[in-house]
Amino acid sequence: MEILRIENVTKTYGEKDTAVHALDRVSFSVEEGEFVAVTGPSGSGKSTLLHILGGVDKPDSGTVQVKGTVEENILLPLLLDGKKPNPKRLAQILSILGLEDRKEHLPSQLSGGQQQRVSVGRALITHPAVILADEPTGNLDQKNTKEIMDLFCKLNRTYKQTIVMITHDMKLAAQCDRVLAIVDGR
């Protein structure tokens, strides 16, 4: 079942001679439970795409749909702000992340990999339709990179969590179900 559809999304920054066409009529869809990597060189439009998918930025034209509804669905976590999380859901997420024994620790008391897992937990607590991850292993060593990718693979394969990940690392991209390459905003 299709969970995410992007149709003819265009985004330009600046005007006339200084215009940068970050995205140029980008279209694709993602099936529920699919793990998709978006790759491409720096400046190709990957982060702009992720910002638009996450509702942080709006496209100049085109549409983004999640579960058959328009882009605002992605903003659901903001609408839920102020509500208390389900304690059972929190316990489940802590278990999935392997952080049960670290739940009382401050961020400065966690390793880089544990901090990344906390970020994944913040995404999971709202039952998202899609997790959007922008270079989730970019600042991690090999051991923690493997842990984060193993976690994403577990979330995807065991819990059928849909994930769209931006990465420069083709070895990481190869672990995904599908790889989309973006160059010059296309």
Image (cartoon, rainbow, N blue to C red):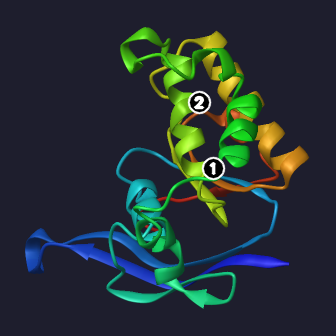
Residue 137 in sight from this viewpoint: no
Q: Residue 36 placed where, x, y %?
A: 71, 55
Mark 2 Cα-neighbour bin, 10 Å: few <14, some 14–19, many ≥20: many
Q: Is residue 162 above or below residue 171?
A: below
Q: Residue at left 58%, top 40%?
A: 120
Residue for badge 1: 124
Q: What amino acid is at disc 1? A: Leu
**First in sequence: mark 1 vs mark 2:** 2
Q: Residue 44 placed where, x, y %?
A: 41, 56
Q: Is residue 60 above or below residue 23?
A: below
Residue for badge 2: 117
Q: Residue 67 placed where, x, y %?
A: 69, 82
Q: What amino acid is at disc 2? A: Arg
Q: Secondary structure at mark 2?
A: helix
Instruction: Specify whether 30 is left or right of 126.
Output: right
Contact check, label 1 and label 2, Cβ < 8 Å: no
- Spatial separation of the CA atoms under disc 1 and disc 2: 10 Å
Place residue 174 in its image quadrant: top right
Instruction: Say which of 74 and 11 sits in front.
Output: 74
Q: Residue 20 placed where, x, y %?
A: 23, 68
